[in-house]
Amino acid sequence: MVATVREMFEESDGCIKIKEKDLRYGGVIVFINDDGVSDFRVHMFYAEDIFTGLPPSTGVMQDPTWFDISSLGKLDMMPADRFFLPMILSERKVIRGKVIFEKGFKGVKEFSYEEISSHEIQTLLGEIQP
């Protein structure tokens, strides 16, 4: 969670300051490329209703824009994000998911997930706490 706070601060050139207490855990997704080599695991956090205004463009964030959650399915985003972002942000599910990409990350070959219990959430958070 400390890394999430730091990354948002750094990538917004110090314009967005999140406190750990404002973060909500969305779950963990394992991304697997069909080449069997470039696999990675991502813990997802989000914060809501704590920002006002619009952060400026930075070297990392180009023309940041706020979107209504109901428009997620219409946005141009990474193919796998369409599967799990609405579940996490709209339905408030906390999930353990797996995305298998077609070779070269060209598209999503398979997506699966399960909701996780409060106990499992604490275990996962324990893995990433310093």
Image: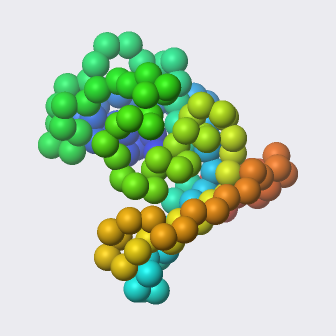
Residue at image location 82% in from the left, 50% down from the top: 117
Q: Position of residue 33 (x, y in %)?
A: 43, 76
Residue lying farthest top? 52
Rendering quarter of residue 16? top left
Residue 72 position by quadrant: top left
> Which residue appears at 68% of the width and 51% of the height?
95
Image location (x, y in percent) of residue 41: 53, 66
Q: Residue visible at 44% across and 71% down?
A: 101
* Residue 20 visible in this rendered orientation of the protein: no
Q: Is 10 drawn above or below residue 47 in the view shown?
A: below
How many labels were placed on the picture?
A: 0
Asked if residue 42 can be seen in this view, the reply is yes
Report the coloring of the rendering: rainbow
Decide: is 42 above or below 51.
below
**Closest to the observer, 8 or 82:** 82
Residue 52 vertical placement versus 4 (above, below): above
Image coordinates for residue 80, horizontal then vertical, percent: 46, 56
In the rendered image, the vertical position of residue 66 relative to residue 123, given as above or below: above
Towards the viewer: 40 or 88: 88
Quadrant where the C terminus lies? bottom right
Q: Is residue 105 left or right of residue 2?
A: left
* Apparent side of residue 3 relative to residue 78 in the rendered image (left or right): right
- Residue depicted at x 32% and y 76%: 104
Taking 87 as reference, is 82 left or right?
A: left
Rendered location of residue 17, percent (x, y): 40, 28
